């Protein structure tokens, strides 16, 4: 079963981290990736640029409208994700707990099941 | 590679691997060597003809690869020592029978997660390539390769198991492979059919080796009786067709006959188990000309037995449908009302889907639509969701 582990981040929380904590996060992600790669559960990961860089194409019923900036103005947003394939939701939760973000107040990992898959290497 | 040679090789693969593992230990290295021997055979046999002793040919070629590998290996001496005490004289082909089973037990080692057991079984016993397995499960080949490699590492030191206490795990793994193929959640159907075919082939093999085991026979019958409906289970564009609406004239009669005979014989002779009961339920459905003709009283009795043998809220849900068909929809609704408090199933889409179906039967269509809507939001299967959404507008 495939799950998307969505990193729900808050830039204010990340900015407040000490250098040491920032290192801990960086190394933690490295370790996490190694763990799920070796277990054969890792498919893909991407980190996303700040939504300030986003453009949004919105349906209007006629010609779509194009605006700059995020879809939703919010303190938290999706900063990136891991796509994994594992035994169960319980296992996905267990893996999410290994992601260093879960050690800091104000950061979170959202676990969403995948319903349809297609891709160049599938 | 011709289909005939491909089939033959996949049938022989576990025998060859089993022989090598028994002789040398080193599952990891043996498995690689067998894959190479299979590849060589798939090229040479169609051109030069199949050897008279195909198993012997493969064992020899794979054995040579192993030796080559060990020669270039610093740990050669240590490995040779480790191999002392293993049976090196054996040429008795009847031992292959045991080897296939023991190989299955090894692949279903309790230290492995279910996805790893499944992947290793398909590769080591099913003789599928890593690419084929990755394709069937819609993951990149690198992911599947790593999963198999880790699984082999994990069981590296494990002995070649003898006892049959692992048989229930083996049956569960075969059941998982079948289900993955049958409840196609995404991707092209063709590859998924490969998984059901493979699950049936492997279960048939286990049944041949353990003909008196009732649960093995039960699982094989269950697969045959379920797979018999495959062609009618979805429309050409992939939409789900429920049992009641399937075109029963297109069900596979041959598979049904085989499954029914198998389960009838087993129920009469072996101790009762959950797979046999599920097969018996499938048989009642398969033998009915229409939903109304179905012997629902019989189905209900069987679900009660199943609920006692293997208590599980999903079984209770199915029992509720049978109850509704025998005693009316309200009786079914009363039964599932108890499940709302059951953590294992509360919030699961099946609970809402069954409730919706029973409300529809009771003529309470407005409430039914609401339940179908909730179920549609809850399911993680695309065809299921589309089916449930269709029901909300019905």
Image (cartoon, coloured by chain):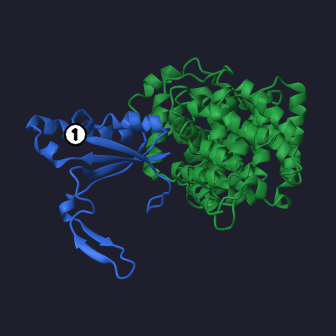
Query: Left of B219 or right of it: where is B192?
Result: left
Quadrant of the rendering where the C terminus of chain B is positioned: bottom right
Colour of chain B as rendered? green
Query: Left of B366 or right of it: where is B73?
Result: left
Name the residue tied to disc 1. A106
Residue at the far left in the pictured view: A19
Q: Quadrant of residue B166?
A: top right
Residue B175 visible at all: yes
Residue in the image at 48% along x and 51% along y = B139
Query: Which structural element holds mark 1?
Result: loop
Residue B373 coordinates in the image, percent (x, y)? 56, 54
* Viewer-side residue, B274 vs A29: B274
Mark 1, other Cα within 10 Å: few <14 / some 14–19 / many ≥20: some
* Viewer-side residue, B202 vs B284: B284
Above or below residue B150? Residue B386 is: below
Chain letter corresponding to the colour blue: A
Residue B322 coordinates in the image, percent (x, y)? 78, 40
């Amino acid at each position: 079963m495939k799950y998307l582990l969505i990193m729900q981040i808050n830039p204010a929380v990340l900015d407040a981290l000490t250098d040491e904590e920032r290192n801990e996060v960086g190394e933690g992600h490295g370790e996490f990736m190694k763990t799920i790669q070796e277990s054969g559960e890792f498919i893909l990961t991407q980190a996303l640029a700040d939504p300030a860089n986003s453009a949004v194409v919105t349906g209007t019923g006629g010609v779509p409208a194009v605006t700059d900036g995020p879809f939703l103005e919010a303190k938290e947003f999706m900063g990136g994700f891991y796509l994994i394939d594992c035994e169960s939701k319980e296992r996905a939760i267990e893996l999410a707990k290994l992601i260093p973000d879960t050690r800091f107040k104000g950061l979170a990992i959202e676990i969403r099941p995948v319903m349809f898959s297609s891709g160049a290497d599938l | 590679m011709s289909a005939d040679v491909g089939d033959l090789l996949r049938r022989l693969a576990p025998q060859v691997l089993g022989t090598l593992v028994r002789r040398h230990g080193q599952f990891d290295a043996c498995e690689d060597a067998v894959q190479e021997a299979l590849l060589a055979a798939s090229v040479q046999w169609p051109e030069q003809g199949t050897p008279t002793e195909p198993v012997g040919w493969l064992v020899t070629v794979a054995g040579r690869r192993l030796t080559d590998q060990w020669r270039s290996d610093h740990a050669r001496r240590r490995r040779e020592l480790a191999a002392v005490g293993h049976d090196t004289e054996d040429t008795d082909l009847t031992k292959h029978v045991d080897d296939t089973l023991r190989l299955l037990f090894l692949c279903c080692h309790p230290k492995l997660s279910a996805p790893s057991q499944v992947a290793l079984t398909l590769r080591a016993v099913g003789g599928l390539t890593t690419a084929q397995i990755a394709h069937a499960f819609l993951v990149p080949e690198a992911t599947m390769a790593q999963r198999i490699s880790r699984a082999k590492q994990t069981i590296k030191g494990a002995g070649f198991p003898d006892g049959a206490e692992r048989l229930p795990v083996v049956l569960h793994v075969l059941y998982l492979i079948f289900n993955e193929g049958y409840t196609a959640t995404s991707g092209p159907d063709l590859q998924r059919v490969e998984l059901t075919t493979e699950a049936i082939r492997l279960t048939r093999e286990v049944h041949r080796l353990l003909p008196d085991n009732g649960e093995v026979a039960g699982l094989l019958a269950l697969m045959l009786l379920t797979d018999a409906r495959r062609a009618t289970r979805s429309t050409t564009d992939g939409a789900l067709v429920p049992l009641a609406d399937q075109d029963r004239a297109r069900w596979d009669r041959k598979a049904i006959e085989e499954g029914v005979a198998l389960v009838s014989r087993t129920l009469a002779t072996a101790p009762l188990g959950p797979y046999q009961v599920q097969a018996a339920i499938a048989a009642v459905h398969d033998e009915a000309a229409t939903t109304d003709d179905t012997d629902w009283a019989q189905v209900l009795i069987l679900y009660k037995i199943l609920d006692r043998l293997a208590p599980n809220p999903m079984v209770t849900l199915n029992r509720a449908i049978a109850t509704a068909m025998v005693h009316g929809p309200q009786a079914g609704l009363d039964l599932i009302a108890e499940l709302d408090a059951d953590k294992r199933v509360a919030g699961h889409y099946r609970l809402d889907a069954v409730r919706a179906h029973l409300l529809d039967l009771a003529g309470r269509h407005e409430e039914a639509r609401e339940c179908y809507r909730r179920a549609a939001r809850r399911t993680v299967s695309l065809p299921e969701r589309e089916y449930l959404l269709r029901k909300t507008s019905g």
